[in-house]
Image (tube, rainbow, N blue to C red):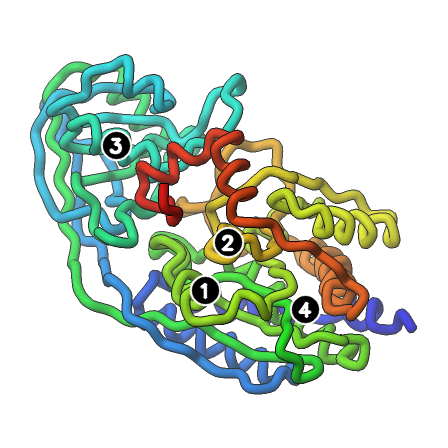
């Protein structure tokens, strides 16, 4: 029976939910908007037929932006604070460190300086260097301020959090500037004294995860996940309203195919992802990993037509994704490397099989994501529907009693982190969970 495909391809359930999410406005972790988005997602899952739809709350470090500024010479340059930057004001020489690669910090004395780094990496570099890694290289090398320069043109200052799980508020003030402002600072003020100021409201707050279920009441389960929070400066359509819309659309499709599910499917829309994977870490700490057969984490879907599956070295996950792609004659991209930067990771780091599912892109970094331009108009309904067809069949396959995705040992994950040059970055950002 393939009538479900026609039903899905004419469904507006996920798209309508996406519209509701982006129209909320601010969905920053711990905000009223995030709570509204979680409640709407719970209700949407219940409306399509998922059972036991509920919210699970947890405490987080709250942060709300105030005013920020960069004063350089007699000029004031536009900027925005990076979430969880401390409130502070520093005056120091500006050092433009280009890409801000680990070697750049080793080769340059940044003690007592305000460091500016780009948001991308050069073509020759063999791995992505995350914003937080660049920030903590600056901290560890004695910088007193951090300026994060977008590589995407268009007068779009980037956002993105700093801080660690143990110390949620960062050590030095941090701001984002557009590519154009960064170029101006580098041209006119490199080596000159600048003043970086951040004002923020730092407070206790609460976030929540959304849960719901379909299929038989088995101990084992397949997790279908996204995150419902977004940065406060934009609609959060690409990151990650589309992912949560996908979870709702998949629940809608799987409710019509519930008899095909041989293992329970649990839908989870996490809170507080953008400030350090707080919701998924909370869930990972509270749940039995042995009951999780696989994770399908939707973070970055729909922004392009072709799906990309980061499979983290799990051969069974790669085979399952390729089988679905072959069945529909729909190309997908497979990335077998580790990817420690979304809500699958608190489980995958301990050997639980998990995908990071997103849309393929030739761009480095997030594109419109984490900027004012993360808006609804960048997405197409067709892409949501096509990708939902593939992912629905993938979840059914993973929930089959015949599905065998072998776990990986923690030692294998650690070995790959070292081999793929990811371990150093995780250690400096406080994300290394293993005993050395």
Which of pointers 3 and 2 lies earlier in the amino acid sequence?
Answer: 3
Q: Which residue is mark 2?
A: 350
Label annotation for residue 284: 1
**Rendering coords of residue 86 (x, y %):** 16, 47
Residue under the point 28% across and 30% down: 137
Distance in Å between CA atoms under marks 1 and 2: 10 Å
Comparing labels 3 and 2, the label whose residue is closer to the camera:
2
Label annotation for residue 147: 3
**Rendering coords of residue 194 (x, y %):** 12, 26
Label annotation for residue 60: none
Q: Are there few (<14), some (14-19), or many (20+) residues within 10 Å of tag 1?
A: some
Asked if labels 2 and 1 touch by Cβ distance under 8 angstroms, the answer is yes
Distance in Å between CA atoms under marks 2 and 4: 26 Å
Report whether 431 appears left or right of 225.
left
Q: Is residue 28 above or below residue 304?
A: below
Residue under the point 89% across and 70% down: 2
Q: For residue 103, which quarter of the picture?
A: top left
Report helix, strand or loop for mark 4. Answer: helix
Report whether 156 appears left or right of 315.
left
Asked if labels 4 and 3 touch by Cβ distance under 8 angstroms, the answer is no
Distance in Å between CA atoms under marks 3 and 2: 34 Å
Report whether 394 appears left or right of 194.
right
Report helix, strand or loop for mark 3. Answer: strand
Report helix, strand or loop for mark 1. Answer: helix
Q: Nearer the viewer, residue 328 or 276?
A: 276
In the rendered image, the quadrant that contains the C terminus is top left
**Rendering coords of residue 384 (x, y %):** 67, 58
Asked if labels 4 and 1 touch by Cβ distance under 8 angstroms, the answer is no
Q: Which residue is mark 4?
A: 250
Which of pointers 1 and 2 lies earlier in the amino acid sequence?
Answer: 1
């Amino acid at each position: 029976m393939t009538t479900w495909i026609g039903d899905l391809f004419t469904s507006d359930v996920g798209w309508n939910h996406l519209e509701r999410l982006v129209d909320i406005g601010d969905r920053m972790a711990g905000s009223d908007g995030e709570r509204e988005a979680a409640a709407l997602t719970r209700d949407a899952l219940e409306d399509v037929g998922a059972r036991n739809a509920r919210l699970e709350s947890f405490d987080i470090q709250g942060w709300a932006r105030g005013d920020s500024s960069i004063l350089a010479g007699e000029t004031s340059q536009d900027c925005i604070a990076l979430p969880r930057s401390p409130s502070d004001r520093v005056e120091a020489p500006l050092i433009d460190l280009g890409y801000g690669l680990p070697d750049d910090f080793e080769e340059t004395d940044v003690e007592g300086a305000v460091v500016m780094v780009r948001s991308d990496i050069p073509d020759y570099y063999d791995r992505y260097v995350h914003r937080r890694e660049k920030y903590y290289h600056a901290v560890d090398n004695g910088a007193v301020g951090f300026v994060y320069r977008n590589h995407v043109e268009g007068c779009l200052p980037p956002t993105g959090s700093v801080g660690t799980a143990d110390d949620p508020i960062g050590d030095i003030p941090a701001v984002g500037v557009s590519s154009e402002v960064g170029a101006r600072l580098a041209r006119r003020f490199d080596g000159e004294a600048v003043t970086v100021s951040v004002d923020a409201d730092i407070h206790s707050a609460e976030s929540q995860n959304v849960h719901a279920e379909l299929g038989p009441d088995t101990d084992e389960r397949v997790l279908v996940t996204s995150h419902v929070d977004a940065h406060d400066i934009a609609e959060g359509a690409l990151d990650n309203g589309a992912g949560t819309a996908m979870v709702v659309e998949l629940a809608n499709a799987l409710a019509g195919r519930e008899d095909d599910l041989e293992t329970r499917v649990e839908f989870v829309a996490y809170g507080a992802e953008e400030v350090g994977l707080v919701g998924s870490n909370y869930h990972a700490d509270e749940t039995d990993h042995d009951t999780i057969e696989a994770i399908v984490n939707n973070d970055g879907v729909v922004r392009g037509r072709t799906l990309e599956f980061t499979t983290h070295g799990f051969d069974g996950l790669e085979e399952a994704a390729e089988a679905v792609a072959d069945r529909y004659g729909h190309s997908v991209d497979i990335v077998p490397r580790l990817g420690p930067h979304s809500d699958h990771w608190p489980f995958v780091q301990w050997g639980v099989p998990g995908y990071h599912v997103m849309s393929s892109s030739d761009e480095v970094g997030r594109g419109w994501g984490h900027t004012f331009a993360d808006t609804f108009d960048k997405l197409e309904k067709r892409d949501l529907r096509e990708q939902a067809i593939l992912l629905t069949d993938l979840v059914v396959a993973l929930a089959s009693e015949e599905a065998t995705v072998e776990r990986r040992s923690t030692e294998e994950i650690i070995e790959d982190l070292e081999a793929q040059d990811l371990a150093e970055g995780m250690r400096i950002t406080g994300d290394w969970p293993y005993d050395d």
